Image: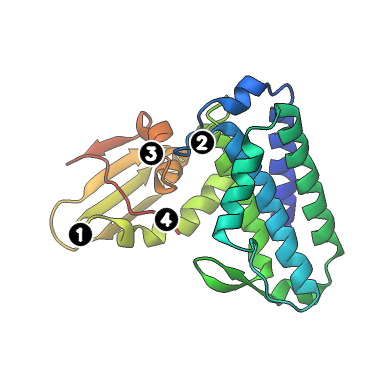
C-alpha cells in the first residue's frame, strides 16, 4: 500500500530529526497550544499505539476506537510529556515499529473492516495509513524546531490540498468568499458566498496547506492577501 510507504519514509525522517534531542528541546513550547514538544512527541507515539489497537481489532473482527476514552488519551500524553528526551525518542521509534509490524501482518480482508473514529464515526481501516502520515508530518512541524511546513514533501502538500480545498467553504466566516492561488504550482481554487469581492490568498502550496491545516503562523509571512485580511477558518476535520 503506497500510503504505508509514505508513513515509513516520514517516520525515518522524523526519527533522524530526533537524533541528539535534548531534555531542553522536549521541554520547549510547541505550536500546539498548551503542549510542549514532549507532549507532541508523546502524542505521536500514543497515536501509533491507537492505530495498532484498531488494526489488531480489525484483524480479529472487532470494531474498536484508537483510545479507550478521551480522558485516557489525555492522561497518557500528560504522563509521558515530561520524560527525558532519550526515553521519548525511543518511545516514538518503538511504537512506530510495532505499528508497522502489525500492518505488515494484517490479512487483506482486515483493511476493509471498520474502526470507530471520534469525529467521523465508522471508517475503514484502510484510511488509517494516510491518517498516520498526516500525524507525523504535521506534528513534526508542530515541534517548532528546524522542520516546518516549508519542508513538507511536495506529495504530502498535494495530498493536504486535495483533501482540504474542497471543504474550505464550510469553514469560512458567514458570507465570505475566498480565492486561493498556489504560486508555485499554478493551481487555483474559489469558494464561498456568491457575489461580492472574494478575499484572495496567494502563496506557495505548502503555505496554503499549512494555513488550511490551522497552522497559520508559520505560513503567514509566505502568504499575500488582497481585499481583506487572512480569514480565520473554523477547525478542519
Query: Circle 4 is placed at which residue position?
Result: 236
189 relative position to 121: left or right: left
From the image, state whether disc 1 or disc 2 is nearer to you.
Answer: 1
Disc with the residue nearer the chain's start (1 vs 4): 1
- Residue placed under numbered mark 2 in the picture: 149
What is the C-alpha distance between the residues marked 4 and 2?
17 Å
Closer to the N terminus: mark 3 or mark 4? 3
Image quadrant holding the C terminus, namely bottom left
The kind of secondary structure element at disc 3 is helix
Could you classify mark 1 by the number of other residues whose Cα lies within 10 Å: few (under 14), some (14-19), or many (20 or more)? few
Label 3 near label 2: C-beta < 8 Å? no
Q: Relative to 40, is 179 above or below?
A: below
Q: Secondary structure at mark 4?
A: loop
Instruction: Classify 10 Å Cα crowding around label 2: few (below 14), some (14-19), many (20 and above).
Output: many
Task: Please say if the residues under marks 1 and 4 sit with CB atoms less than 8 Å apart.
Answer: no
Q: x and y percent of residue 75 in the render? A: 60, 49
Pick whichever of labels 4 and 2 is earlier in the sequence. 2
Tell me which corner region of the image, top left, top right, bottom left or bottom right, holds residue 59: bottom right
**Rendering coords of residue 189 (x, y %):** 35, 54
Q: Residue at x 20, y 51 (%)?
A: 198
Residue underneath mark 1: 174
Amino acid at each position: 500500500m503506497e500510503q504505508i510507504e509514505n508513513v515509513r519514509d516520514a517516520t525515518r525522517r522524523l526519527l533522524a530529526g530526533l537524533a541528539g534531542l535534548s531534555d531542553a528541546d522536549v521541554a520547549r513550547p510547541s505550536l500546539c497550544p498548551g503542549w510542549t514538544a514532549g507532549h507532541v512527541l508523546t502524542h505521536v507515539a500514543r497515536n501509533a499505539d491507537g492505530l495498532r489497537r484498531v488494526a489488531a481489532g480489525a484483524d480479529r473482527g472487532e470494531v474498536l476506537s484508537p483510545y479507550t476514552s478521551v480522558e485516557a488519551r489525555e492522561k497518557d500524553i500528560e504522563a509521558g510529556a515530561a520524560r527525558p528526551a532519550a526515553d521519548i525518542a525511543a518511545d516514538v521509534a518503538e511504537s512506530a515499529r510495532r505499528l508497522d509490524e502489525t500492518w505488515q501482518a494484517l490479512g487483506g480482508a482486515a483493511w476493509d473492516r471498520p474502526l470507530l473514529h471520534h469525529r467521523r464515526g465508522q471508517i475503514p481501516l484502510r484510511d488509517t495509513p494516510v491518517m498516520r502520515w498526516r500525524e507525523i508530518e504535521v506534528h513534526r512541524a508542530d515541534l517548532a524546531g528546524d522542520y516546518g511546513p516549508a519542508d513538507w514533501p511536495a506529495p504530502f502538500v498535494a495530498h493536504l490540498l486535495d483533501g482540504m480545498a474542497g471543504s474550505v467553504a464550510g469553514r469560512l466566516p458567514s458570507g465570505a468568499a475566498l480565492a486561493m492561488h498556489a504560486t508555485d504550482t499554478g493551481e487555483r481554487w474559489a469558494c464561498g458566498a456568491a457575489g461580492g469581492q472574494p478575499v484572495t490568498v496567494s502563496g506557495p502550496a505548502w503555505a496554503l496547506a499549512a494555513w488550511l491545516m490551522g497552522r497559520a503562523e508559520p505560513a503567514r509571512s509566505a502568504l499575500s492577501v488582497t481585499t481583506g485580511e487572512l480569514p480565520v477558518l473554523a477547525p478542519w476535520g
